[in-house]
Image (tube, grey):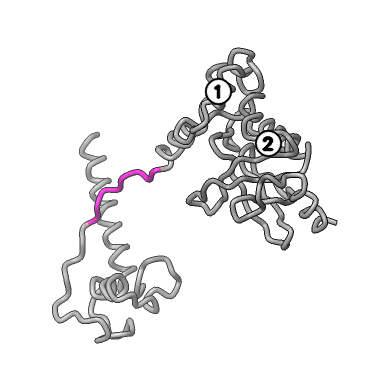
Amino acid sequence: MFRLLVPVLFLLFGCEQVSSDLLLGRVVGIADGDTFTLLLAESRTVRIRLDQVDAPERAQAWSRQSQEMLARLLRTGPVRVRVEDTDRYGRSVGRVYAGAVDVNLTMVEQGGAWAYPQYVRDRAFVHAEERARRARRGLWSMPERQTVAPWEFRRTRSAHARPARVSPTRRAEPVEDFACGAKAQCSQMNSCEEANQYLRVCGLTRLDRDGDGTPCEALCRPAMVEANSDTNRVGVAAAEASR
Protein backbone atom coordinates (compact mmCIF):
# COMPACT_ATOMS: atom_id res chain seq x y z
CA MET A 1 0.00 0.00 0.00
CA PHE A 2 2.78 2.41 0.99
CA ARG A 3 4.62 1.86 -2.29
CA LEU A 4 1.48 2.81 -4.19
CA LEU A 5 1.44 6.16 -2.37
CA VAL A 6 4.66 7.38 -3.96
CA PRO A 7 3.34 7.80 -7.53
CA VAL A 8 0.16 9.33 -6.08
CA LEU A 9 2.21 11.83 -4.09
CA PHE A 10 4.26 12.58 -7.18
CA LEU A 11 1.06 13.47 -9.05
CA LEU A 12 -0.15 15.60 -6.13
CA PHE A 13 3.13 17.51 -5.96
CA GLY A 14 4.16 17.26 -9.60
CA CYS A 15 5.65 20.70 -9.55
CA GLU A 16 8.13 19.44 -6.95
CA GLN A 17 10.36 16.84 -8.52
CA VAL A 18 10.90 13.71 -6.43
CA SER A 19 14.69 13.64 -6.18
CA SER A 20 17.44 13.17 -3.63
CA ASP A 21 16.42 16.58 -2.23
CA LEU A 22 12.75 15.63 -1.75
CA LEU A 23 11.85 12.69 0.47
CA LEU A 24 8.40 11.10 0.58
CA GLY A 25 7.53 8.55 3.21
CA ARG A 26 5.72 7.42 6.31
CA VAL A 27 6.60 8.49 9.85
CA VAL A 28 7.66 5.51 11.96
CA GLY A 29 9.20 7.21 14.99
CA ILE A 30 9.35 10.56 16.77
CA ALA A 31 12.37 11.31 18.96
CA ASP A 32 11.36 14.75 20.20
CA GLY A 33 9.79 17.97 18.99
CA ASP A 34 12.19 18.50 16.09
CA THR A 35 13.40 15.02 15.08
CA PHE A 36 11.58 12.03 13.62
CA THR A 37 12.22 8.95 11.49
CA LEU A 38 10.82 8.59 7.98
CA LEU A 39 10.34 5.24 6.21
CA LEU A 40 10.91 5.58 2.46
CA ALA A 41 9.37 3.48 -0.30
CA GLU A 42 12.51 1.37 -0.69
CA SER A 43 12.20 0.32 2.99
CA ARG A 44 15.03 2.63 4.00
CA THR A 45 14.69 4.83 7.08
CA VAL A 46 16.00 8.37 7.35
CA ARG A 47 16.25 10.51 10.48
CA ILE A 48 14.80 13.96 9.83
CA ARG A 49 15.67 17.16 11.71
CA LEU A 50 13.31 20.12 11.28
CA ASP A 51 15.17 23.00 9.67
CA GLN A 52 15.36 26.47 11.31
CA VAL A 53 13.65 25.38 14.56
CA ASP A 54 14.80 24.03 17.92
CA ALA A 55 12.47 22.15 20.27
CA PRO A 56 12.93 21.55 24.02
CA GLU A 57 15.42 18.87 25.00
CA ARG A 58 14.05 15.77 26.69
CA ALA A 59 15.15 16.97 30.13
CA GLN A 60 13.44 20.35 29.64
CA ALA A 61 9.94 21.49 30.51
CA TRP A 62 7.43 21.18 27.64
CA SER A 63 9.50 18.47 25.91
CA ARG A 64 6.69 15.90 25.97
CA GLN A 65 4.08 18.41 24.77
CA SER A 66 6.38 19.48 21.93
CA GLN A 67 6.85 15.86 20.85
CA GLU A 68 3.08 15.27 20.93
CA MET A 69 2.47 18.42 18.90
CA LEU A 70 4.88 17.24 16.20
CA ALA A 71 3.15 13.85 16.13
CA ARG A 72 -0.25 15.49 15.60
CA LEU A 73 1.01 17.72 12.79
CA LEU A 74 2.69 14.83 10.98
CA ARG A 75 -0.63 12.96 10.95
CA THR A 76 -2.44 15.71 9.04
CA GLY A 77 -1.42 14.43 5.58
CA PRO A 78 1.19 12.73 3.39
CA VAL A 79 4.66 13.68 4.61
CA ARG A 80 7.33 15.11 2.35
CA VAL A 81 10.66 16.63 3.29
CA ARG A 82 12.63 19.12 1.24
CA VAL A 83 16.17 18.37 2.39
CA GLU A 84 18.44 21.40 2.87
CA ASP A 85 21.45 19.88 4.61
CA THR A 86 22.88 16.98 6.64
CA ASP A 87 23.94 17.68 10.21
CA ARG A 88 26.91 16.27 12.11
CA TYR A 89 24.74 13.45 13.47
CA GLY A 90 23.88 12.27 9.96
CA ARG A 91 20.28 13.55 10.09
CA SER A 92 18.67 15.06 7.00
CA VAL A 93 17.78 18.65 7.87
CA GLY A 94 14.82 19.99 5.94
CA ARG A 95 11.50 21.75 5.57
CA VAL A 96 8.74 19.27 6.38
CA TYR A 97 5.20 19.30 5.03
CA ALA A 98 2.25 17.11 6.02
CA GLY A 99 -0.31 17.61 3.29
CA ALA A 100 -0.62 21.39 3.01
CA VAL A 101 0.74 22.04 6.53
CA ASP A 102 4.20 23.59 6.90
CA VAL A 103 5.25 21.56 9.94
CA ASN A 104 8.39 23.57 10.78
CA LEU A 105 6.64 26.92 10.78
CA THR A 106 3.54 25.61 12.55
CA MET A 107 5.63 24.18 15.39
CA VAL A 108 6.95 27.68 16.09
CA GLU A 109 3.58 29.38 15.47
CA GLN A 110 1.86 27.11 18.01
CA GLY A 111 4.57 27.46 20.63
CA GLY A 112 6.01 23.96 20.25
CA ALA A 113 9.53 25.12 19.38
CA TRP A 114 11.80 28.13 19.08
CA ALA A 115 13.00 29.77 15.89
CA TYR A 116 16.67 28.70 15.83
CA PRO A 117 18.63 32.00 15.55
CA GLN A 118 21.83 30.33 14.37
CA TYR A 119 20.07 28.73 11.39
CA VAL A 120 17.07 30.95 10.59
CA ARG A 121 17.03 32.10 6.98
CA ASP A 122 13.30 32.71 6.64
CA ARG A 123 12.12 35.67 8.74
CA ALA A 124 8.67 34.07 8.90
CA PHE A 125 9.99 31.91 11.74
CA VAL A 126 11.03 34.95 13.78
CA HIS A 127 7.61 36.58 13.30
CA ALA A 128 5.85 33.30 14.16
CA GLU A 129 7.76 33.08 17.45
CA GLU A 130 6.91 36.70 18.28
CA ARG A 131 3.21 35.96 17.76
CA ALA A 132 3.39 32.82 19.88
CA ARG A 133 5.14 34.76 22.68
CA ARG A 134 2.53 37.53 22.69
CA ALA A 135 -0.36 35.05 22.69
CA ARG A 136 1.41 32.88 25.31
CA ARG A 137 0.83 29.79 23.23
CA GLY A 138 2.44 26.45 23.99
CA LEU A 139 5.73 26.67 25.86
CA TRP A 140 5.31 30.44 26.19
CA SER A 141 2.49 29.79 28.67
CA MET A 142 5.07 28.58 31.18
CA PRO A 143 6.78 30.83 33.75
CA GLU A 144 9.68 32.75 32.25
CA ARG A 145 12.27 30.84 34.31
CA GLN A 146 11.20 27.62 32.56
CA THR A 147 11.36 28.96 29.01
CA VAL A 148 15.08 28.34 28.59
CA ALA A 149 16.10 28.11 24.94
CA PRO A 150 17.38 24.62 24.07
CA TRP A 151 20.76 25.89 22.85
CA GLU A 152 21.28 27.67 26.19
CA PHE A 153 20.19 24.52 28.05
CA ARG A 154 22.68 22.39 26.09
CA ARG A 155 25.49 24.87 26.70
CA THR A 156 24.84 24.88 30.46
CA ARG A 157 24.57 21.10 30.63
CA SER A 158 27.78 20.70 28.64
CA ALA A 159 29.63 23.03 31.03
CA HIS A 160 28.40 21.07 34.06
CA ALA A 161 29.41 17.78 32.43
CA ARG A 162 33.05 18.77 32.02
CA PRO A 163 35.26 16.63 34.28
CA ALA A 164 36.83 18.30 37.27
CA ARG A 165 40.52 19.00 36.95
CA VAL A 166 42.64 16.40 38.71
CA SER A 167 45.99 17.23 40.24
CA PRO A 168 48.74 15.53 38.26
CA THR A 169 50.31 12.53 39.95
CA ARG A 170 54.04 12.09 40.24
CA ARG A 171 55.43 10.31 37.23
CA ALA A 172 57.57 7.27 37.90
CA GLU A 173 61.23 7.66 37.10
CA PRO A 174 62.15 6.01 33.79
CA VAL A 175 63.65 2.55 34.11
CA GLU A 176 67.16 2.20 32.72
CA ASP A 177 67.60 0.00 29.65
CA PHE A 178 63.82 0.01 29.12
CA ALA A 179 62.62 -1.29 25.74
CA CYS A 180 59.19 -2.61 24.71
CA GLY A 181 59.40 -6.31 23.91
CA ALA A 182 62.36 -6.98 26.17
CA LYS A 183 60.13 -8.43 28.88
CA ALA A 184 56.63 -9.89 28.85
CA GLN A 185 55.92 -11.50 32.26
CA CYS A 186 55.56 -10.21 35.80
CA SER A 187 58.27 -12.66 36.88
CA GLN A 188 60.73 -10.71 34.72
CA MET A 189 59.97 -7.33 36.29
CA ASN A 190 62.44 -5.89 38.80
CA SER A 191 60.09 -3.27 40.25
CA CYS A 192 56.55 -1.90 40.23
CA GLU A 193 57.81 1.15 38.29
CA GLU A 194 59.15 -1.11 35.56
CA ALA A 195 55.88 -3.07 35.40
CA ASN A 196 53.94 0.20 35.11
CA GLN A 197 56.09 1.34 32.20
CA TYR A 198 55.49 -1.88 30.30
CA LEU A 199 51.73 -1.53 30.94
CA ARG A 200 51.36 2.19 30.16
CA VAL A 201 53.96 2.67 27.44
CA CYS A 202 54.00 -0.72 25.72
CA GLY A 203 50.34 -1.63 26.28
CA LEU A 204 51.30 -4.99 27.84
CA THR A 205 47.84 -5.62 29.30
CA ARG A 206 48.64 -9.18 30.36
CA LEU A 207 50.42 -7.61 33.35
CA ASP A 208 47.04 -6.31 34.59
CA ARG A 209 45.00 -9.52 34.69
CA ASP A 210 42.04 -8.13 36.64
CA GLY A 211 41.88 -4.87 34.66
CA ASP A 212 42.04 -2.60 37.71
CA GLY A 213 44.95 -0.56 36.34
CA THR A 214 47.54 -2.06 38.70
CA PRO A 215 50.09 -4.36 37.02
CA CYS A 216 51.86 -7.28 38.66
CA GLU A 217 50.03 -7.05 41.95
CA ALA A 218 52.60 -9.17 43.78
CA LEU A 219 55.05 -6.34 43.09
CA CYS A 220 52.79 -3.29 43.21
CA ARG A 221 50.25 -4.07 45.92
CA PRO A 222 52.83 -4.23 48.74
CA ALA A 223 54.22 -0.89 47.60
CA MET A 224 50.72 0.63 47.61
CA VAL A 225 49.97 -0.78 51.08
CA GLU A 226 53.23 0.62 52.40
CA ALA A 227 52.49 4.03 50.88
CA ASN A 228 49.03 4.03 52.45
CA SER A 229 50.49 3.03 55.80
CA ASP A 230 52.96 5.92 55.62
CA THR A 231 50.07 8.28 54.80
CA ASN A 232 48.04 6.95 57.73
CA ARG A 233 50.99 7.32 60.11
CA VAL A 234 51.46 10.93 59.03
CA GLY A 235 47.74 11.57 59.55
CA VAL A 236 47.78 10.05 63.03
CA ALA A 237 50.87 12.01 63.98
CA ALA A 238 49.30 15.24 62.78
CA ALA A 239 46.11 14.50 64.73
CA GLU A 240 48.07 13.81 67.91
CA ALA A 241 50.08 16.98 67.47
CA SER A 242 46.91 19.07 67.20
CA ARG A 243 45.49 17.78 70.51
Q: Position of residue 112 (x, y in %)?
A: 64, 28
Residue at the spot 27% in from the left edge and 85% down from the top edge: 181
Q: Nearer the viewer, residue 31 or 39?
A: 39
Residue lying furthest top: 134
> Residues in magenta?
162-169
Estimate how packed mark 2 is, as few (under 14), some (14 to 19) or many (20 or more) residues with alpha carbons within 10 Å.
many
User: Dot 1 lies on which element?
Assistant: loop
Disc 2/disc 1 C-alpha distance (Å): 16 Å
Find disc 2 in the rendering and name its residue: 67
Amino acid carrying label 1: it is Thr
The quadrant the C terminus occupies is top left
Check disc 2 and report its element: helix, strand or loop: helix
User: In the depicted view, which residue is nearer to us: 32 or 133?
Assistant: 133
| Residue 68 position (above or below residue 8) | above
| Vertical position of residue 59 compared to residue 6: above or below | above
Q: Quadrant of residue 223?
A: bottom left
**Res 173 → quadrant:** bottom left
- What mark, if any, has residue 147 been given in the picture? 1
Secondary structure predominantly adopted by residues drawn in magenta: loop
Q: Percent position (x, y) of residue 185?
A: 33, 84
Residue 56 in picture, x, y percent from top left? 58, 33
Residue 236: x and y in percent read: 27, 46
Of 179 and 236, which appears nearest the observer?
Answer: 179
Residue that appears at 73% across and 35% down: 100
What amino acid type is highlighted by mark number 2?
Gln
Q: Is residue 216 left or right of residue 237?
A: right
User: For residue 130, which quarter of the picture?
Assistant: top right
